[in-house]
Amino acid sequence: MQLRTPEGQLLMAAAKSFKPDFGFNLHDQNAYYGAGEKGLPATISVLAPAYNQQREINLSRGNAMKLIAQLSKLIEQEVPNHLAKYNDSYSYRSFGDTFSEMGISTILIESGAYPHDPNRQVARKINRMLYVQMIDELISDKWQQQEIATYQAIPFNVKDAWVDLLINDVTILSPQGSYVTDIAINAKGRYPQINELGDISSIRQGFTQLDAHTLSFDAGKAYPLAKPLDLTTEKYRQLLVQGYSCFSGDLTLINNQSDWLSYQCANTLSAMPTRHGAAAFILREQGTAKYAVLGEQLIKL
């Protein structure tokens, strides 16, 4: 570790001066990790970092694993099957691995998502409970009775296992012929885009998920903006039912009072969904608009 930042130098100096038995590395992680293959969202992820390339378990790393094993009981009690652990590949540039190499029992805790909890209040609650239990455990030494095998049994964190909105088996009516696909959308950025197309449901799950086997994709129409528009929820719903999915012209004319995004139309609207294309379209059943998609929001019409 090169310690080429002032804060890194200060942290290392503090560690060498204080010489702690335990160190805690606390972070947030993105919402899309899963607790194992096809598992639930990883609300809490943990790691006892490796101290060498061989990922051996010495006394200090073993102690970190045992304390995590003890803490895992609380996590499983509060949010069953929402616990995962990171891959322990050694990273010489990481403070967690470096501190582990220095003999500090280091524990990484990353806070992720929980279904229907956009502000991560569940992860906040679990963190507070964990910190209190950590202190109690370190005072009582009960954690030392735990088995390292309990830590090793925690499922691995799976990246991009979840998406915000997953539409399964929707029919695309293309000029070259009809076909069926899945559409995945995440809410990253101001205007979410279509992340993926294809066979998605076999490897990912959606926080919101729709079986669309009776539905067909419609890119929708452009609503022309010629004068100011007060866009209430009811007015927006009427436009969506009429097949308008986006707006052409000056979007500053819109006074959007709804909870839904307003999309600027592309120069041309494709009959087929495209990767990185606008997440603004209509889903129809036998010609009737049944749902609208605006960003990660699925709107029943």
Image: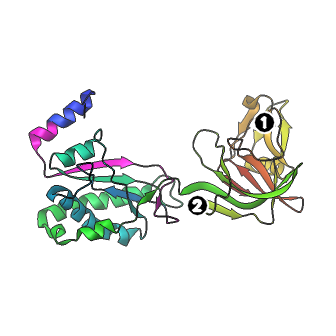
Dots 1, 2 in contact, CB < 8 A: no
Query: Who's the residue at 16% across and 56% down the image?
Result: 60
Q: Between marks 1 and 2, how big is the CA–CA gap?
A: 31 Å
Residue 276 in the figure: left or right of residue 14: right
Q: Secondary structure at mark 1?
A: loop
Q: Which residue is mark 2?
A: 203
| x and y percentages locating residue 197 in the rendered image | 69, 51
Residue 232 lies in what quarter of the image? top right
For residue 15: magenta? yes
Residue 5 sits inside the magenta stretch: no
Determine the residue positioned at 41% across, 68% down: 79
Taking the spot 28% from the left edge, 41% from the top edge, the residue there is: 92
Question: Image quadrant for the N terminus?
Answer: top left
x and y, in percent, of residue 154 in the image: 36, 66
Label for residue 265? 1
- Residue at (64, 58) in percent of width and height: 200
Q: Is residue 253 visible?
A: yes
**Residue 301 appearing in the image:** no
| The quarter of the displayed image where residue 221 is located | top right
Q: Residue 101 location in percent, x, y?
A: 19, 47
Residue that sits furthest to the front in the current view: 54
Task: Give neighbour class at mark 2: few <14, some 14-19, many 20+ (Cα, 10 Å).
Answer: few
With respect to residue 10, does 53 lie above or below? below
Three-letter code for the amino acid on which mark 1 is drawn: Cys
Q: Residues within 10 Å of mark 1 (few under 14, many from 20)?
A: some
Q: What's drawn in magenta, residue-wise?
A: 14-40
State left or right for residue 115 relative to residue 49.
right
Q: Quadrant of the C terminus?
A: bottom right
Kind of residue sitting beneath label 2: Ile
Tell me which numbered mark, 1 or 2, is placed earlier along the sequence. Answer: 2
